Amino acid sequence: MKTWKDCVAFHGHECGGLTIGYKASLYAIELLNLEFSADEQVVCISENDACGVDAVQVMLGCSIGKGNLLFHMRGKQAFSFYNRKTNKSVRLVLKPRPEGMTKAESFAYYQSCKPEEMFEVKEATIQLPEKARLFDSYTCECCGESTGANWIRLAGGKKLCLDCYETYDRFDV
């Protein structure tokens, strides 16, 4: 199993945010009987794009490239974890920390907490996403760059990428 030191090596430094993701991962491992995800067995939907996400990648093998690390940006220190093998899930929401702490005190506080002291356990509210799809690629007939089929638009009989396609919206000008 990966360790705190592995998370720090990946992230580049120790910080409170990394600790949050590390402890969330440990708690999810315990609650859902998770193992490192070689493919898409474990899924994490993070509600933030902060430091803790790096720990989730290291500890659980969730990554954007594999399609099992997704973002539902809400600016919250909250993570929904899914175990595809058992169809069980959990949403972990960071509890408020004592106010008035310095950065160093906050780091020490999170390091000293047990995961169950840090997080409120809730039911995952976002449905488990389907596994990642593979899309055919097409060449944009304007810029010449290859683009996945899901992101191609037709305009004037030409296949255009989203950068070259001009959207039509009479109300948002």
Image (tube, grey):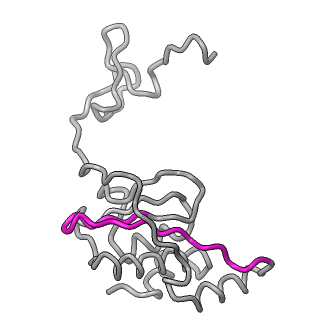
Residue 20 position by quadrant = bottom right
Q: Quadrant of the N terminus?
A: bottom left
Residue at the (53%, 51%) spot, across then down: 73
Q: Residue furthest top?
A: 156
Residue at image coords 38%, 59%: 69
Left/right of residue 70 with respect to residue 120 in the rendered view: left
- Whether residue 111 is situated above or below residue 73 in the rendered picture: below
Please tell me which residue is depicted at 60% across the width and 14% down the height of the picture.
Answer: 171
The percent position of residue 134, horizontal first and vertical second, equals: 22, 43
Q: Which stretch is magenta?
A: 80-99
Q: Which residue occupies the foreground of this view, 92 or 132?
A: 92
Is 88 within the magenta?
yes
Q: Residue reaching furthest bottom?
A: 112
Q: Is residue 152 placed above or below 173 in the rendered structure?
A: below
- The image shows residue 116 at horizontal and vertical percentages of 49, 83
Looking at the picture, how far across and down is residue 8, in whole percent?
51, 82
